[in-house]
Image (cartoon, rainbow, N blue to C red):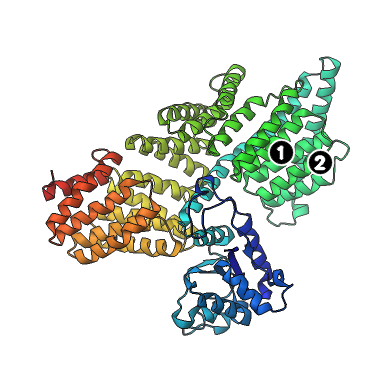
């Protein structure tokens, strides 16, 4: 197909269509997905072109024929749904033409306004209907829809859902990348602000102690003093907005304070480019830390146009740009920018700010995340040696270097070395920064993940409890990201058979998630599923079925990759409750879904087969069941240690069936 998708919309919704077009065509797929087969062929760096505007066909003398030709060369039809499009002749005709080609299953919807099914449900205002009637003609049913109305998916989640639909891959594979970014962003917020203001204070101290040095050093000191003075003036000016005489009693947000500072920097200090660039770099880092990537990167790119003569300032500018690329997942670009900063750091022989170790560690970190497990190792070890010599073995720069080495070793599957590096790093951070620092939580999360992969559930649970304690200190009990850590801890407890404690944690996490996220948020599928397993372990079969049924509805709506495991758990309940035929039907559905979503995890398919074996025995087909139970044991024994949940259930089934 020439086009990956055709965006059908009414001209009154042009801005939304243009935004959707831009979001889809600019999305870069994660490296691990590239080359994989999809509904539109092997996945590349970006999608093929998206057809959005009929003006692309302006050269044609027959617009209708041209639109039909474009639809014939389109893999997916995306309908921008609003009351405008529901009443649009063009939108309905485009839907009819596309479905007539036998591709009704490749239609997706993006709801931007109005109300779905308002014209088909009693008591609703039909004028608010947003779904074009052509969607329902000739036996058509409502397709899955992404929703950017207030309180719903939001543009970012909608983009990922539409991309998953175009490629026919699990939405969770794209969502996990964004989730990792968010967790990393939260961990870096305080660090970015602290580094900026510590740098400002260091400039002032350096100016005071340099007065008696040689002329070159004295000139540097004067420059740093001027920078420090401008810094103090600038910081004071930011918070003048909180003066009641200026604010007039209104509430002023941190974002407004930052925006005011950005405007003030732009219009001042033109005769002091080094000072101006330093301030703009620091401010951009705060924006990046808060997740305002476009704003932060825009500010630092503006600063690059200044006539900067201080190599230390230029180093920090390039490091800021590299940090922006890193936080947005473009690790290859981050490596490139960090490497370009190295010559400026090495040329800075007067300021006393040795940034080379930080750059070397960052190169290794970014290279590891980009999949380059060979690049950057020597640089990280050099950074560790330099920082240990300069700051001591228990310093925060050393902790940073150890974390970079931990990521590197974890990427290579060297879990013992990775765990050792992270344990040293978190020990330093606890001593220097305490439990209430976001990077401490990040380190404990990494340790929990590594211990889990090492088949060490007790240690994984201990680390995750420490991560949860840190998260609650930083974010509070009712923050949705705390609910994520809570669910991770509960899952570890489930796999050890600690059902009561896991149930209490999951009920709390579920309440927080429902309060803070939409009812169709795909993370609910995982929470409901885990809660169902906890209820089942406690013998509360009715509550287990109800919770798993809720998980199933969310998973089906959001294309969550846990759909197969959820169906398997429900099948097990049906089979042990005297409904073997229903259980076998659920397993027939679960098997291909699980194979597709967990191709690299043999135990997942093994668990479906093991459950089928038990179900066949319950249905009176004892011979078939015994064969499946025996054949499915190997991957389960390889994955799960003795005493763990799935291993214990499988061994009990084997023993009860008399399988050797």
Q: Is residue 92 visible?
A: yes
Query: In the image, what residue occupies the spot 53% across and 81% down?
Result: 133
- Are discs 1 and 2 less than 8 Å apart at CB? no
The N terminus sits in image quarter: bottom right
Task: Count every numbered label the image shows and give the total.
Answer: 2
Q: Which residue is mark 1?
A: 282
**Residue 538 visible, this orientation:** no
Q: CA distance from mark 1 to mark 2?
A: 16 Å
* Residue labelled with disc 2: 305
Residue 52 percent location from the top left of the image: 65, 67
Vertical relation: 391 (above or below) 308: above
Q: Position of residue 229 (x, y in %)?
A: 80, 33
Tell me: 650 left or right of 248: left
Specify whether 278 is left or right of 482.
right
Query: Between 185 and 465, which is closer to the camera in this rendering?
Result: 185
Q: Quick one: label 1 or label 2, which is nearer the N terminus?
A: 1
Percent of width and height locating residue 644 = 26, 42
* Label 2: few (<14), some (14–19) or many (≥20) C-alpha neighbours in 10 Å: few
Q: Secondary structure at mark 2?
A: loop
Taking 655 as reference, is 385 left or right?
Answer: right
Q: Quadrant of residue 564?
A: bottom left
């Amino acid at each position: 197909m020439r086009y990956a998708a055709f965006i059908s919309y009414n001209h009154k919704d042009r801005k939304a269509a243009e935004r959707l077009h831009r979001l889809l065509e600019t999305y870069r797929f994660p490296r691990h997905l590239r080359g994989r087969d999809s509904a539109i062929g092997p996945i590349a760096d970006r999608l093929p072109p998206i057809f959005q505007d009929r003006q692309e066909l302006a050269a044609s003398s027959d617009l209708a024929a041209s639109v039909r030709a474009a639809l014939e060369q389109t893999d997916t039809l995306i309908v921008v749904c609003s009351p405008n499009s529901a009443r649009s002749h063009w939108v309905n005709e485009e839907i009819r033409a596309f479905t007539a080609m036998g591709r009704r299953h490749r239609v997706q919807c993006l709801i931007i306004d109005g109300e779905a099914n308002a014209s088909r449900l009693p008591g609703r205002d039909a004028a608010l209907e947003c779904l074009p009637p052509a969607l329902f003609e000739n036996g058509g049913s409502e397709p899955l829809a992404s929703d950017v109305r207030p309180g719903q998916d939001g543009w970012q989640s909608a983009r990922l859902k539409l991309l998953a639909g175009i490629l026919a891959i699990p939405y969770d594979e794209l969502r996990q990348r964004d989730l990792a970014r968010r967790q990393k962003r939260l961990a870096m917020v305080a660090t970015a602000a602290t580094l900026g203001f510590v740098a400002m204070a260091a400039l002032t101290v350096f100016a005071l102690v340099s007065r008696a040095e040689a002329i070159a050093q004295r000139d540097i000191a004067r420059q740093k003093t001027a920078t420090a003075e401008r810094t103090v003036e600038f910081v004071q000016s930011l918070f003048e907005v909180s003066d009641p005489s200026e604010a007039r009693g209104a509430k002023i947000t941190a974002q407004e304070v930052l925006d005011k500072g950005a405007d003030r920097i732009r219009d001042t200090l033109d005769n002091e480019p080094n000072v101006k660039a330093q301030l703009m770099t620091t401010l951009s880092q705060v924006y990046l830390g808060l997740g305002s990537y476009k704003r932060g990167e825009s500010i630092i790119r503006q600063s690059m146009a200044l006539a900067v003569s201080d190599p230390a300032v230029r180093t920090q500018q390039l490091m800021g740009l590299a940090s922006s690329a890193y936080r947005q997942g473009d690790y290859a670009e981050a490596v490139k920018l960090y490497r370009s900063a190295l010559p400026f750091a090495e040329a800075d022989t007067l300021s006393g700010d040795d940034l080379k170790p930080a750059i070397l560690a960052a190169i290794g970190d970014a290279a590891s995340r980009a999949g380059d497990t060979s690049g950057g190792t020597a640089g990280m070890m050099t950074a560790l040696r330099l920082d240990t010599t300069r700051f001591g073995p228990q310093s925060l720069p050393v902790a940073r270097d150890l974390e970079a080495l931990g990521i590197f070793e974890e990427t290579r599957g060297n879990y013992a070395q990775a765990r050792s590096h992270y344990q040293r790093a978190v020990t330093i951070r606890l001593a220097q920064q305490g439990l209430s620092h976001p990077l401490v939580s990040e380190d404990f999360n990494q340790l929990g993940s590594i211990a889990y992969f090492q088949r060490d559930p007790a240690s994984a649970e201990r680390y995750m409890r420490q991560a949860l304690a840190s998260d609650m200190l930083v974010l509070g009990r009712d923050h949705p990201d705390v609910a994520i850590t809570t669910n991770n801890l509960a899952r570890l407890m489930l796999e050890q058979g600690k059902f009561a404690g896991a149930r209490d944690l999951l009920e709390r996490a579920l309440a927080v998630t429902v309060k803070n996220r939409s009812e169709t948020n795909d993370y609910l599928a995982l929470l409901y599923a885990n809660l169902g397993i906890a209820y089942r372990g406690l013998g509360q079969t009715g509550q287990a079925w109800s919770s798993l049924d809720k998980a199933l509805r969310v998973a089906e709506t959001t294309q969550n990759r846990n759909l197969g495991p959820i169906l398997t758990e429900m099948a097990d309940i049906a089979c042990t409750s005297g409904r073997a035929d229903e259980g076998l039907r659920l397993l027939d559905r679960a098997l291909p879904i699980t194979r597709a979503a967990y191709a690299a995890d043999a135990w997942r398919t093994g668990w479906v087969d093991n459950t089928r074996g038990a179900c066949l025995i319950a249905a009176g087909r004892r011979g078939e069941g015994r064969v499946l139970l025996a054949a499915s044991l190997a991957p389960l024994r390889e994955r799960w240690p003795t005493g763990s949940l799935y291993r214990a259930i499988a061994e009990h089934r084997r023993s009860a069936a008399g399988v050797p």
